[in-house]
Image: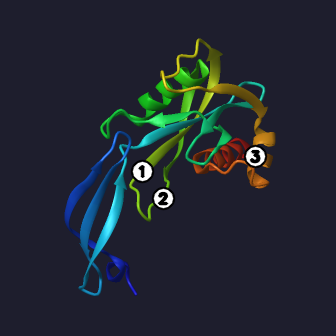
């Protein structure tokens, strides 16, 4: 079977929920068999995330409560793009400064993560930031976070034990550790 035999074709779409963070659309698609089907798609402007690594090999993480999963999480700093056209690196720099107070001299893009491609078009651009210097935090009004410094190896151990379940954090930490080892 070739790739063309797997492709769905967008026919039409309509907004069914115009939310603040996501917009839900119903899409009619033509299946490879020629039949049509409904796809419910959560549309998101995208986001950026940062693995900030200090000169001692510590990663700077953000501790916050995530009401959707009902628990405190430890994550790499991240935030959504102001619009789909915003430069992801600009967003990453803004989010690092807002959430941690750090700025970085060096930036390297690690990947672009598609979080849940079964129903959502969100893409998170993940960066490694080094050459950190400390400034003042200035989180959004509805954002309550605390920063945690942790050796990168310890953070990777948390991922491997299944304790960091956030996908951007797990992938970002693993990619940063791999990148620094090679």
Label 2 residue SS = loop
Mark linked to residue 114: none
Q: Answer above or below: position of 167 versus 125.
A: below
User: Mark 3 or 2 closer to N-term?
Assistant: 2
| Residue 73 horizontal side relative to residue 160, left or right | left
Label 1 Cα neighbours within 10 Å, binned few <14 / some 14-19 / many ≥20: many
Q: Picture coordinates of residue 71 (x, y %)?
A: 66, 43
Labelled pair 1, 2 in contact (Cβ < 8 Å): yes
Mark linked to residue 122: 1
| Quarter of the view holding residue 41 | bottom left
User: Mark 3 or 1 closer to N-term?
Assistant: 1
Q: Picture coordinates of residue 35 (x, y %)?
A: 25, 84
Distance from the alpha carbon under mark 3 to that under mark 1 = 24 Å
Label 2 Cα neighbours within 10 Å, binned few <14 / some 14-19 / many ≥20: few
Name the residue beneath numbered marker 3. Answer: 156
| Residue 38 horizontal side relative to residue 76, left or right | left
Residue appearing at x 21%, y 58% in the figure: 14
Mark linked to residue 116: 2
User: Mark 1 or 2 closer to N-term?
Assistant: 2
Residue appearing at x 49%, y 26% in the figure: 142
Q: Picture coordinates of residue 165 (x, y %)?
A: 66, 51
**In front here: 71 or 98?**
71
Q: Answer above or below: position of 26 versus 62.
A: below
Residue appearing at x 44%, y 61% in the figure: 117
Depth-wise, is mark 3 or mark 1 nearer the camera? 1
Label 1 residue SS = loop
Labelled pair 3, 2 in contact (Cβ < 8 Å): no
| Residue 117 horizontal side relative to residue 138, left or right | left
Q: Picture coordinates of residue 34 (x, y %)?
A: 23, 85
Distance from the alpha carbon under mark 3 to that under mark 2 = 22 Å
| Residue 114 horizontal side relative to residue 170, left or right | left
Residue appearing at x 36%, y 79% in the figure: 6
């Amino acid at each position: 079977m070739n790739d063309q035999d797997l492709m769905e074709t967008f026919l039409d779409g309509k907004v069914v929920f115009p939310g603040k963070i996501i917009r839900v659309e119903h899409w009619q698609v033509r299946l490879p068999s020629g039949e049509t089907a409904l796809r419910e798609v959560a549309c998101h402007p995208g986001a950026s995330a940062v693995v900030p690594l200090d000169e001692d090999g510590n990663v700077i993480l953000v501790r916050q409560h995530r009401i959707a999963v009902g628990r405190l999480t430890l994550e790499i700093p991240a935030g959504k793009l102001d619009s789909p056209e915003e430069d992801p690196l600009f967003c990453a720099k803004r989010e690092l400064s807002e959430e941690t107070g750090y700025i970085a001299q060096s930036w390297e893009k690690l990947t672009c993560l598609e979080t849940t491609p079964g129903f959502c078009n969100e893409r998170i651009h993940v960066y490694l930031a080094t050459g950190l210097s400390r400034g003042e935090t200035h989180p959004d009004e509805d954002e309550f976070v605390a920063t945690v410094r942790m050796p990168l190896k310890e953070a990777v151990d948390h991922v491997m034990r299944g304790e960091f379940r956030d996908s951007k954090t797990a992938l970002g930490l693993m990619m940063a550790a791999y990148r620094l080892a090679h």
